[in-house]
Image: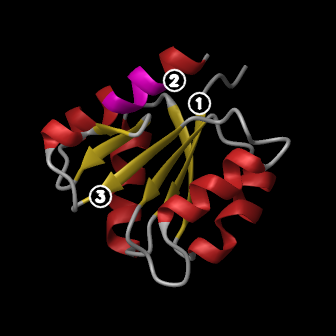
Amino acid sequence: MNSKRKILIVDDNPMIAKMVRVWLERTGFYKTREQTDPLHALETARHFKPDLVLLDVDMPGMDGGKVGDAIRRDPELGGTPILFLTAFIARAESLAGGRKFIPKPVSPAELIESVEEALAVCH
């Protein structure tokens, strides 16, 4: 039985997306998929059906807020928790407007703790 939680990583920087994927998969608890084009994030989420979306904020073409709104409006994905990753927010501001933000740079331990907290609250 495969009980790995599915995490979709949306970040336009392939190196960051890969780093996050490696950190999560090393735990043995997560199956991940990377999407580096925010314009394809909703389609990827529909096919992958993630338990959680890690979403960069500052991306070309469509920012993370718009991607997150599209995911929340989707009938099949609307309840999927979203964690925003951003270099533009301080740790003290990490919960703003009801949205959870993870400030970059982030350590593997901080990332995994945030993912676990989000999954525990929503499932």
Mark 1 vs mark 3: in front: 3
Image quarter of the N terminus:
top right
What x and y, as percent, mark residue 88? 22, 61
Please report the residue visible at 49 percent of the width from the left and 63 percent of the height from the top: 64
Q: Are marks 2 and 1 in contact (CB under 8 Å)?
A: yes
Front in this rendered view, residue 3 or 9 = 9
What x and y, as percent, mark residue 48? 73, 50
Q: Label 1: which residue?
A: 5
For marks 2 and 1 on the same chain, the one whose residue lies earlier in the sequence: 1
Image quarter of the C terminus:
top right
Q: Does the magenta stretch include residue 64?
A: no
Mark 1: amino acid: Arg
Query: What is the chief secondary structure element of the magenta stretch?
Result: helix
Crowd tier of the residue under label 1, counting other residues whose Cα lies within 10 Å: few below 14, some 14–19, many 20 or above: some
What span is in magenta? 114-118
Q: What element carries label 1?
A: strand
